[in-house]
């Protein structure tokens, strides 16, 4: 692989970002507990402090209501601060006048669960939602009358009023200011930007619903109807990209960013990985003054839905890279669409999918998948969320500084270094991006030299650092960390914990990048670098920390304050969680050798879910001073591992019993033993096959489907466990044709195919998912 060597020198003389009340200064408010949300022109506030939230989209009606609570807890553990969901009109009123708010459509139950676990909520209530559902969420029966949808046609507004009143009844008393979770309501979706396929038309594809008429006046009508219906959140939001209409005031415009699209086949390399100051120069013309609002994203790609005509694979590195580029470019709200995938319900008269998309699956390759699958992007997003929770109040007011030429780079340029800064008062962060979709980026051997009013800063202090391909990196400079004066670090900040006068600051080291932390010496009384080293040079301490959770640097300040610096490996960081657990905040590091292992907390328990591995470890800091217990399995005596206590957990191994027969190359019948032992929470199937489209049937109904895009098909069985007792699961493959198709009309349409048809199962593996709940021994 080629390596590019470069030294970058930059004089930081940019004035601080001007923060004003902005257009949303009268929005926000308090709840009965005294918690609050508010806005400036540049960022959101939480309890009066700058706040950069992570928003995760999860469509309740596309998932089993019996598992909502667990999935919401997984989202919280994954670093999501606010959940967002659509209320699809046609899911609730498929037949005129017959509303269904039961089971998976039970909006009130979902809202109540968000209240229970203190999870702020944004509802996207339409009437038009898009969301890749049939007719963009507009029921088929609406088109039986001469109604102009998405307009101020009185007949349409009458239907919108009825829908909003129904929604209002379901969420009565659930607004943030009333002690509930609902902080915002989105009206319509992509209004005057795009319309969905008109699936009820039925004669041919390519016919689309209206993108809307009436501009801001129609949005004002929807807002009036919502308020009169009793829908009164702290804030209304609208989608603002693609020339969409935005109200003059009283709504937060929200943006989107997708690098991999199913609606643009053969898309060229994307500009989503190029830095620019989004607050001043948005990526496209917008219908509002951008400097009066925070740059807020509600649809940054958390993956992408595969369509029949375009089948992109979204690598986890792209999601991390786009997040860091948007953050560096001034975005102060990061919203992932989708964060959690799901399954479309089957309607009474039709499937509910959008044309050319799968009938059932809406997995979206998202961090949490159709059946709750935990993907690798889940862990990457969590590391960034931990950083924002700990340091977002510092970062949020910092303005974006774009070095000359950066916003003019072409996506095809793999030679130039991509970098920018966010700074305030000559302190801040350097952002580096070495990822570009569809292209191979070279390794870089580089050195960055900043001249600031506080003095020179270099990354590293001497020599150079290596930036590997596909990496996004954030490097801090001139920060005050609770009294510890950080000059620079080649390690990335992850999180921090405070316990009285003691602070733990957690960094992590990127692979191949030498770890270095430089501190002002004036405030420091002593440093114990342990297995690392610390050298005093003039007025600076140059620390080379030993990397890994077994090591730490201990620092005492002259004023008596003490610090522990931890420098984790990148793998350890990807396994790190921060929980309020057993009376205090604790770091928990899941065994990084088991990529599927994930954690969350519930009822004062640490819940460990481990796919395919019956033995795993969890390292906890601060170390509990009490014995731990398990409900099922065993937990070994804790081993001291630096400041962590590491627990080894094991449960009885289980091999799922699956009998597979193949009536043909294109079909498989599975008899699955559904008598799972107590320690097995779920069994999933991983199916490797070649073909075009695959379907799974149980008791004659379509459970889920899969458009082949070069990666395995995963089916979680927990939801169908009871049905598996006496039923075969039937898998089918539609063949992929490799050859030439000729067609002609001779009284009827005739198609003749010459070539080969590919449809073959390679491997079907059943994977047990073990669950262990850890809690203090009484």
Image: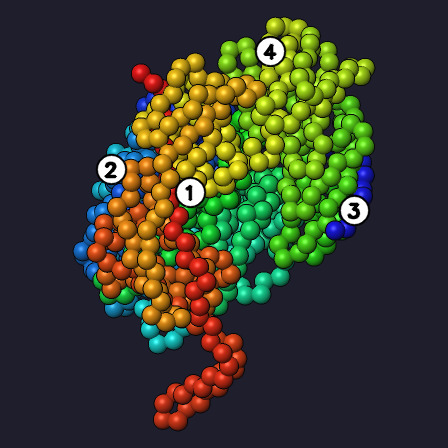
Q: Which residue is mark 1?
A: 611
Residue 172, label in figure: 2
> Helix, strand, or loop for circle 3?
strand
Question: Camera-side residue: 453 or 299?
Answer: 299
The mark lying in front, picked from 2 and 3, is: 3
Residue drawn at x 75%, y 44% is 444
Circle 1/circle 4 CB separation < 8 Å: no
Residue drawn at x 39%, y 17% is 627
The tally of labels here is: 4
Q: In what quadrant of the picture does the C terminus appear?
A: top left
User: Which one is earlier in the sequence, the residue at label 1 or at label 4?
Assistant: 4
Residue 4, label in figure: 3
Q: What whole-number distance in Å separates the C-alpha atoms at marks 4 and 2?
A: 49 Å
Locate residue 692, reporting x and y percent. Answer: 45, 68
Q: Where 116 sits versus 762, above or below?
A: above
Locate residue 211, reporting x and y percent. Answer: 42, 61
> Helix, strand, or loop for circle 1?
strand
């Amino acid at each position: 692989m080629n390596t590019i060597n470069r030294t970058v020198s930059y004089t930081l003389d940019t004035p601080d970002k001007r923060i004003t009340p902005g257009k949303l200064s009268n929005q926000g408010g308090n709840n009965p507990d005294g918690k609050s949300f508010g806005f400036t022109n540049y960022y959101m506030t939480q309890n009066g402090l700058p706040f950069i939230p992570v928003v995760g989209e999860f469509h309740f009606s596309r998932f089993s209501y019996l598992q909502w609570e667990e999935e919401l807890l997984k989202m919280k553990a994954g670093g999501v601060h606010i959940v967002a969901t659509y209320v699809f009109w046609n899911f609730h009123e498929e037949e005129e006048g017959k509303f269904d708010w039961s089971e998976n459509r039970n909006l009130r139950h979902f809202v109540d669960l968000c209240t229970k676990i203190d999870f702020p909520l944004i509802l996207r209530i339409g009437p038009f939602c898009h969301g890749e559902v049939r007719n963009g969420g507009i029921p088929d029966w609406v088109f039986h009358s001469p109604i102009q949808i998405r307009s101020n046609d009185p007949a349409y507004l009458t239907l919108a009023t009825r829908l909003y009143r129904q929604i209002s009844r379901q969420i009565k008393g659930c607004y943030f200011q009333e002690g509930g979770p609902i902080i915002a309501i989105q009206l319509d979706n992509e209004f005057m930007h795009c319309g969905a396929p008109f699936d009820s038309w039925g004669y041919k594809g390519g016919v689309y619903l209206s993108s809307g008429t009436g501009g801001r006046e129609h949005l004002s009508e929807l807002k009036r109807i919502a308020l009169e219906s009793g829908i009164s959140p702290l804030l209304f939001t609208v989608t603002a990209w693609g020339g969409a209409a935005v109200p003059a005031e009283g709504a937060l415009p929200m943006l989107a960013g997708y690098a991999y699209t199913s609606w643009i086949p053969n898309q060229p390399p994307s500009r989503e990985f190029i830095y620019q100051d989004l607050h001043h120069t948005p990526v496209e013309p917008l219908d509002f003054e951008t400097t009066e609002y925070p740059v807020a994203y509600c649809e940054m790609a958390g993956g992408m839905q595969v369509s029949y005509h375009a089948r992109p694979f979204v690598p986890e590195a792209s999601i991390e890279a786009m997040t860091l580029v948007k953050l560096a470019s001034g975005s102060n709200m990061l919203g992932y669409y989708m964060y959690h995938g799901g399954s479309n319900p089957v309607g009474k008269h039709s499937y509910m999918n959008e044309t050319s998309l799968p009938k059932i699956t809406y997995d979206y390759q998202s961090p949490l998948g159709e059946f709750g699958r935990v993907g690798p992007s889940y862990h990457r997003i969590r590391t960034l969320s931990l950083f924002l929770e700990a340091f977002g109040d510092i970062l949020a007011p910092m303005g974006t500084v774009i070095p000359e030429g950066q916003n003019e780079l072409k996506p095809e340029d793999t030679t130039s270094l991509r970098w920018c800064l966010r700074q305030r008062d000559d302190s801040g962060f350097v952002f580096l991006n070495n990822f570009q979709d569809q292209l191979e980026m070279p390794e870089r051997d580089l050195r960055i030299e900043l001249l600031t009013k506080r003095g020179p800063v270099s990354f590293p202090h001497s020599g150079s650092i290596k930036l590997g391909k596909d990496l996004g990196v954030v490097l801090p400079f001139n920060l005050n960390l609770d009294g510890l004066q950080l000059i620079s670090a080649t390690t990335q900040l992850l999180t921090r914990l405070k316990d009285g006068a003691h602070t733990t600051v957690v960094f992590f080291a990127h692979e191949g990048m030498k770890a270095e932390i430089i501190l002002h010496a004036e405030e420091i009384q002593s440093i114990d670098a342990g297995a690392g080293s610390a050298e005093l040079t003039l007025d600076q301490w140059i620390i080379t920390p030993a990397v890994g959770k077994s090591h730490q640097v201990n620092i005492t300040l002259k004023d008596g304050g003490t610090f522990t610096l931890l420098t984790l490996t990148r793998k350890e960081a990807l396994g790190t969680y921060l929980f309020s657990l057993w009376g205090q905040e604790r770091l928990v590091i899941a065994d990084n050798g088991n990529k599927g292992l994930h954690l969350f907390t519930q009822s004062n328990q640490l819940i460990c879910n481990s796919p395919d591995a019956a033995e795993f470890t969890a390292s906890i800091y601060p170390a509990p001073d009490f014995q731990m217990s398990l409900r099922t399995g065993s937990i070994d005596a804790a081993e001291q591992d630096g400041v962590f206590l590491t627990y080894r957990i094991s449960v009885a191994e289980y091999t799922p019993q699956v009998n597979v027969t193949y009536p043909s190359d294109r079909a498989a019948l599975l008899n699955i033993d559904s008598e799972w032992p107590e320690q097995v929470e779920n069994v999933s199937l991983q199916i490797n096959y070649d073909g075009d489209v695959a379907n799974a049937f149980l008791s004659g109904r379509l459970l889920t489907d899969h458009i082949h895009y070069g990666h395995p098909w995963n089916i979680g069985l927990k939801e169908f466990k009871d049905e598996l007792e006496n039923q075969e699961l039937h898998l089918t493959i539609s063949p992929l044709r490799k050859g030439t198709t000729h067609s002609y009309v001779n009284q009827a349409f005739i198609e003749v195919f010459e070539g080969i048809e590919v449809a073959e199962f390679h491997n079907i593996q059943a994977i047990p998912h073990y669950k262990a709940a850890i809690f203090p021994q009484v």
